[in-house]
Amino acid sequence: MDDRAAVEERPTALAELAGELRALAPSCGPVRLVAVDGHAGSGKTTFTGRLAAALGGAPVVHLDDLATHREPFGWTGRLREQVLEPLAAGRDAEYRVYDWTSRRFAATASAPVAPVVLVEGVGAGRRAVRPWLARVVWMELDAVSARRRGEERDGPELAEFWAGWARAESAHFAADPSRPYAATRVDGVTGRIAPGTVGESSTSSLTCDITRT
């Protein structure tokens, strides 16, 4: 489910976005937590890598490391306990990483306290996470095109996996959409930040009657 699509971005726009994110109020203890969300195959991983570099090497948490075959969207508790709560307390986070080949948590990764920490993956801007977020970034690529890109990238041996994933993703976004809460939107093909989404407030409040538990 790695979204390493070829994208392009004007350095000035990316630098402007990085500057804006640094200027946001902290949202998770001393950290400005920023979600990069979108359909699987939409270019999230590549854009997040470029944004992290523009932020001077910001830590990145990949939700694929917390999801599992049986629970593609059942990672909320792991994210909260292993990443969000430590960062909110001003401590570096260390979390267990799922191995998609051996089908078990087999390693660990860290997310040190930093001015901006990025959380990348499908559902990163979900309802349960939004109270901890300073910004949601959405990759603009429709589900059909994103899935086609992912299938071309992963090959026919993962076709069955993609079919199951597509059903789970569709059900997730139908019940818990992230896009309406995204103040920044990025073209999933070109990687260009949509005009007006740097310095523009989101159409809906991030917290939106959600309380942190």
Image (cartoon, rainbow, N blue to C red):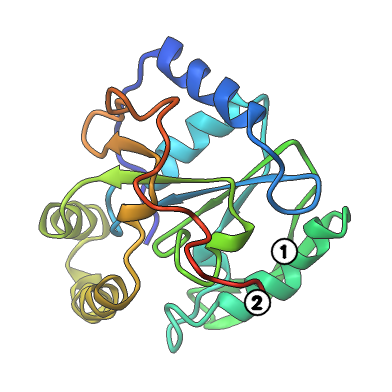
Check if mark 1's residue and mark 2's residue have beta carbons within 8 Å: yes
Quarter assignment of residue 26: top right
Name above or below for residue 184 compared with residue 90.
above
Residue at left offset 32%, top offset 38%: 185
- Binning the other alpha carbons within 10 Å of mark 1 as few (below 14), some (14 to 19) or many (20 upward) gives many
Q: Secondary structure at mark 2?
A: helix
Check disc 1 and report the residue beneath it: 83
Looking at this view, is 82 or 129 the one in front? 129
Check disc 2 and report the residue beneath it: 78
On screen, residue 48 versus residue 156, left or right, reads right
Q: Amino acid at mark 2?
A: Arg
Q: Amino acid at mark 1?
A: Val
Whole-percent x and y of residue 92? 85, 54
Which quadrant holds the C terminus? bottom right
Which quadrant holds the N terminus? bottom left
Residue at left offset 30%, top offset 59%: 40
Looking at this view, is 167 or 15 the one in front? 15
Looking at this view, is 184 or 66 the one in front? 184
**Residue 188: numbered disc:** none
Whole-percent x and y of residue 17? 49, 24
Q: Earlier in the sequence, mark 1 or mark 2?
A: 2
Q: Secondary structure at mark 1?
A: helix
Name above or below for residue 105 compared with residue 145.
below
Quarter assignment of residue 65: bottom right
- Binning the other alpha carbons within 10 Å of mark 2 as few (below 14), some (14 to 19) or many (20 upward) gives some
